[in-house]
Amino acid sequence: MANDTAYLKVDGEEYELPIIQGTLGPAVIDVSAFQTAGYWTYDPGYKVTAPVESKITFIDGDKGELLHRGYPIDELANQADYLEVCYALLHGDLPTTEQKKDFYYKVSRHMGVHEQLRKFFEGFRRDAHPMAIMVGVVGALSAFYHDGLDVSDERHREITAIRLIAKMPTLAAMSYKYSQGHPFMYPRNDFSYAENFLYMMFATPGDVNYKVNPILSNAMDKIFTLHADHEQNASTSTVRLAGSTGANPYACIAAGIAALWGPSHGGANEAVLEMLDEIGSVENVDEFMEKVKRKEVKLMGFGHRVYKNFDPRAKVMKETCDEVLGALGITDPKLALAMKLEKIALEDPYFVERNLYPNVDFYSGIILKAIGIPTSMFTVIFALARTAGWISHWLEMHSAPFKIGRPRQLYTGEQRRDFVKLEDRK
Ligand code: CMC
């Protein structure tokens, strides 16, 4: 690093601002001295603001690099499974054989949910969006597991992290089963995490010999791994901000789910399929692309705030996508349509100049559709997988002293000195 101090000259005063270099990534300028200068920083969209120091995940958007606890995402996705990645996110490194066994045991034994929670589901309309249900029931967990709510107690924090990771597939599958009017399925201890999710989604009580297709459970596990964490994105920052008030972790994760729901974030995978429906057939693609260029619509599943070269998750996801489609022999016209969109976007200068590459949600949407998961569940699956990242960031925040998150603003409203009582207003 060339300098370790930046200088701010304002109103004739010069302030020294320390430059701090992390292990990777651009250095940051510590702007705390602005307080003395009487200025605030203005950065809509937090494009250059680092509100936290973190050791969990690193992204180099220009290089298309994503590391969890220092490991590249493609190595994790191809050589570890989702629960190993969860362990690394939570604990700082991948587990040993013994640690893995213990962690899997704990997660599998916590997958069930309190029976009373079933009644909570009955309060929803059958056609409720499953994300609406998830925001409610995950927040409601805080009303069921009182024995782990002391956020100042490390043991409470740890057990809650396991409970959340373990219960998300069960709650996600319940939200689907409820919409179908089917009985809820209980998790099985002999199934892996991904197998359990598919089993609870698609089996019925009569399926006593239910077998999960290993190609599908592997694909599901990869989807979970590729969505496990993504440093300080909108939903993770929401979880941290909610957590900074001392709120209980279930409420914080519910806040994260709410933030994830939007189409610019986790809602994009659902929006991809809606977009394919809207386009209808391959013949309409050119006309749709013209609309995108006129900025009348967005090409969902393309572009990213951080990745301006390629999304490394999309690369792995595309391989899995080809594998699943090949193995299942699927020839859905929607998929042909998706492939044509991908081809145009990768070649057309409009998209190339703006670095609009397919992101992880473009391919995950296609795989999930091939597996038979309904579109409305796509974002729920993202939330299920991202819970590991959210809770790891929440734990990291609680492992050291922290302050309540309280941003400032640039006020551009009125300042009035002419208050008129209601009866005198014309
Ligand atoms: N379709 C068409 N044009 C786009 C798109 C898109 N999906 N994304 C960006 N652009 C254009 C935008 O109009 C702008 O053009 P110009 O320079 O002519 O004004 C240029 O590209 C730069 O866009 P931006 O709005 O400055 O980019 P951003 O970093 O603020 O937005 C984004 C990132 C992800 C919100 C945006 O690309 C987007 O809305 N994509 C579609 C939604 C999506 O797939 N989201 C999932 C992201 S991956 C999952 C996750 O991590 O949450």
Image (cartoon, rainbow, N blue to C red):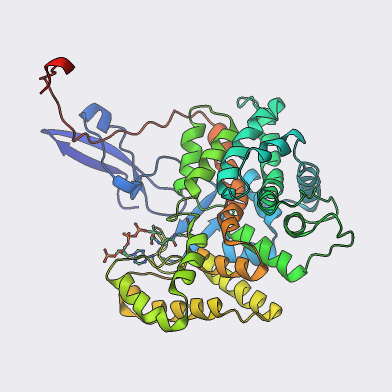
Task: Quadrant for the C terminus, please.
Answer: top left
Where is residue 275, by image quadrant?
bottom left
Residue 357 against residue 425 in the figure, above or below: below
Side of 84 relative to 2 (left or right):
right
Residue 103 visible within the image: yes
Q: On the image, which quarter does residue 306 sit in?
A: bottom left
Q: Quadrant of ligand 1?
A: bottom left
Residue at (85% x, 62% y) in the render: 210
The image position of residue 253, as x and y in percent, is 57, 40
Q: Residue at x 49, y 55 (%)?
A: 267
**Front one among 326 and 2:** 326
- Can I make out residue 396 in this image? no
Q: Position of residue 262 (x, y in %)?
A: 45, 51
Q: Residue at x 60, y 56 (%)?
A: 377
- Identify the residue at the far right of this view: 208
Q: Position of residue 343 (x, y in %)?
A: 44, 81
